[in-house]
Amino acid sequence: QQQVRQSPQSLTVWEGETAILNCSYEDSTFNYFPWYQQFPGEGPALLISIRSVSDKKEDGRFTIFFNKREKKLSLHITDSQPGDSATYFCAASSPNYNQGKLIFGQGTKLSIKP
Amino acid sequence: DPKIIQKPKYLVAVTGSEKILICEQYLGHNAMYWYRQSAKKPLEFMFSYSYQKLMDNQTASSRFQPQSSKKNHLDLQITALKPDDSATYFCASSQGSWGNAEQFFGPGTRLTVL
């Protein structure tokens, strides 16, 4: 059962545009949602995260919008740069997972055209 | 300096053999994890350790055995290797093992089983 889903699978935007990456989940107990950025041949790097008590989290050009009622969140990357080209993973965790387990989506591969 | 070291970077093994994947973290964290990433599946949680004690095991097979000789070490022994074990294995760590503790990932070991 896929508990965390991401869309689209791949996305191409022009440099300077806003890229929007979507994530949805099924488990209503999920309360922590980190986003990871992964470049080829490297490990995932924590980019930004949000807890379910908030509906928005901003860090520079990266913003998470969270809709608890619809069980959806999105990552907005404004002023996209070629260096942002990477695969982005949405993950989720539940207080029921007190052993630290993260559930990952399948990822969105983002390409920025210069 | 890398904060999480995984060795080796690449590993080729023959079916039926045994290998050990090494992970050391220098972040001062007390919780460590193993995840697996393959072309067929997103990042999958395997194990979590806290203060060198196993907290959660999500692998169905006893062929996968984590080993923690020191607080900042969590190695992964894999026995009777199968081609399906081919994947990139990531070690991660966090301060605390509760669900919303920030997890940081190592660069991974890419295992190919022939």
Image (tube, helix red, strand yellow):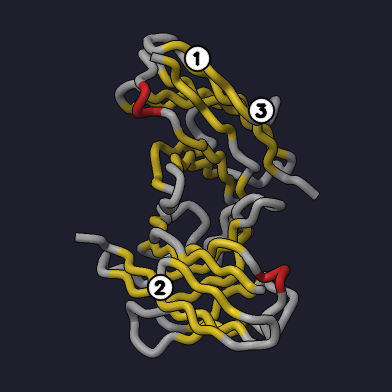
Q: Residue at x 57, y 54 (%)?
A: A102
Q: Position of residue B113 (x, y in %)?
A: 64, 73
Amino acid at the residue labelled 3: Ser
Secondary structure beneath disc 2?
Answer: loop
Residue position marked by numbered label 1 in the rendering: A13
Report, in whole angstroms, how far the alpha carbon at label 2 lies from the one at label 3: 33 Å
Q: Residue at x 45, y 75 (%)?
A: B50
Please tell me the numbered disc located at residue B64. Answer: none
From the viewer's perspective, is residue B73 above or below residue A80? below
Q: Position of residue B92 (x, y in %)?
A: 43, 63
- The C terminus of chain A lies in which quarter of the figure? top left
Report, in whole angstroms, how far the alpha carbon at label 1 lies from the one at label 2: 36 Å
The reply to whether residue A80 is visible in this rendering is yes
Numbered disc in front, either 1 or 2:
2
Q: Are marks 2 and 3 in contact (CB under 8 Å)?
A: no
Q: Position of residue A85 (x, y in %)?
A: 43, 29
From the viewer's perspective, is residue A38 above or below residue A43? above
Q: Label 2: few (<14), some or many (≥20) within 10 Å?
A: some
| Frontmost residue, B73 versus A108 | A108
Report, in whole angstroms, how far the alpha carbon at label 1 lies from the one at label 3: 15 Å
Q: Residue at x 71, y 77 (%)?
A: B82
The reply to whether residue A68 is visible in this rendering is no
Q: Label 3: few (<14), some or many (≥20) within 10 Å?
A: some
Q: Residue furthest left?
A: B1
Subunit of mark 2? Answer: B
Q: Residue at x 39, y 90 (%)?
A: B69
Image-quadrant location for residue B7:
bottom left
Secondary structure beneath disc 1?
Answer: strand
Residue position marked by numbered label 2 in the rendering: B8
Please tell me the numbered disc located at residue A7. Answer: 3
Discs 1 and 3 carry the same chain letter: yes
Q: Are marks 1 and 3 in contact (CB under 8 Å)?
A: no
